Image: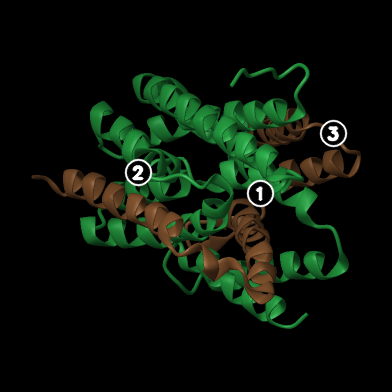
Chain colours: A green, B brown
Amino acid sequence: MSINPRSNPIDRTGLSVAFTVGLYGAAFGAAGVTAGFSILQTCLLSILLFSGASQFAVVGIMGAGGSAISAIATATLLGFRNALYGLQMAPILKVKGFKRILSAQITIDESTAVATLQENDADRKRGFYITGIGVYVFWNLFTFLGALGASAIGDPSVWGLDAAVPAAFCGLVWPRLKDKTQFIVSGAAIALALLLTPLTPAGIPIITTVVLAVIFGWKK
Amino acid sequence: MTQIWIAVIGASVTAFLNKYIGHSVPEKWLDRPRFKRINTLVPIVLLSALVGVQTFAHKKELVIDQRLAGVGVALIALKFKAPFPVVVVSAAVTSAAIYNWF
């Protein structure tokens, strides 16, 4: 497979998503070291766990003095959506054995989002792998650089990175909102998540919105 | 083994199990119109919830800060069909400007 971001719009989308999201890995690397993780431990989270929100949860909770159990539980809840993405991607990718293990590892928000925006299965597959592998490479590279230069980056707000991430998610959800119902579901999900934020542990407000998908999707 | 090592390895194992389980459920489970309708809405609700939480949440509190201005600019850029990097960079520049100058 040759990658050509100039002429292929899927490659272009996938690689710009990968690079933008990857840059935020620098903020994670810095956050990890600031929370008392070694550079090795911080990089291992990006290599092995590889799911941004869960990784931030782990270093955030441990940095605030939380227990390993609460960090693991929160990260697991945050990562459950990846199981739902895997369910969506498996019939398109049709892979077994070692390839399935590798595909599972890169099943995240961004790879699934770019894949499901495409019109046919060949393009979905391409979008998934370009974005998934791209994010993996850039995320790990920038995690390492961020961990190294932790003191230099420090506060992600100074660089506007705190707004870049929700903006990236806006860019991923926007093209999916094709009819009125989907706009309503999106608005309801934001409202529910915000309502639950002060009341429940981190991760719960996001995963709970799946209830809305079930309610609105139940009847035609 | 320290608590941090337990957290790193434990969270990595459950993260992979989450991902792998999704890929290993029988394909026929998806051959239902209802399931497909729900499954189309799943990324919409989760990504929307992430937008909300990452724009307004500061730990367990809801706050209005520079991030909202950044996301507002991102939405305007999306409305005008701007490409993805423009959306993200315009949000970051707006947010950083407000954070650094006010």
Answer with the quarter of the image where residue B86 lies: top right
Secondary structure of residue under mark 2: helix
- As shown in the figure, which amino acid type bears the numbered disc 1? Asp
Label 3, on which residue?
B82
Q: Is residue B43 above or below residue B66?
A: below
Label 1, on which residue?
B65
- Residue toward you, B46 or A196: B46
Say whether residue A93 is left or right of residue B43.
left
Secondary structure of residue under mark 3: loop
Secondary structure of residue under mark 1: loop
- As shown in the figure, which amino acid type bears the numbered disc 2? Gly
Query: Between tags 2 and 3, which lies in front?
Result: 2
**In x, y percent, where is residue A186?**
73, 64
Say whether residue A61 is left or right of residue B88.
left
**Residue depicted at 58% across the width and 76% down the height:** A211
Is residue B66 something one can see in this rendering? no
The quadrant of the rendering that contains the N terminus of chain B is: top left
Looking at the image, tell me whether mark 3 or mark 1 is earlier in sequence order: 1
Determine the chain carrying the residue at label 2: A
Q: What separation in Å lies between label 2 and label 1 (alpha carbons)?
A: 47 Å
Determine the chain carrying the residue at label 3: B
- As shown in the figure, which amino acid type bears the numbered disc 3? Ala
Label 2, on which residue?
A97
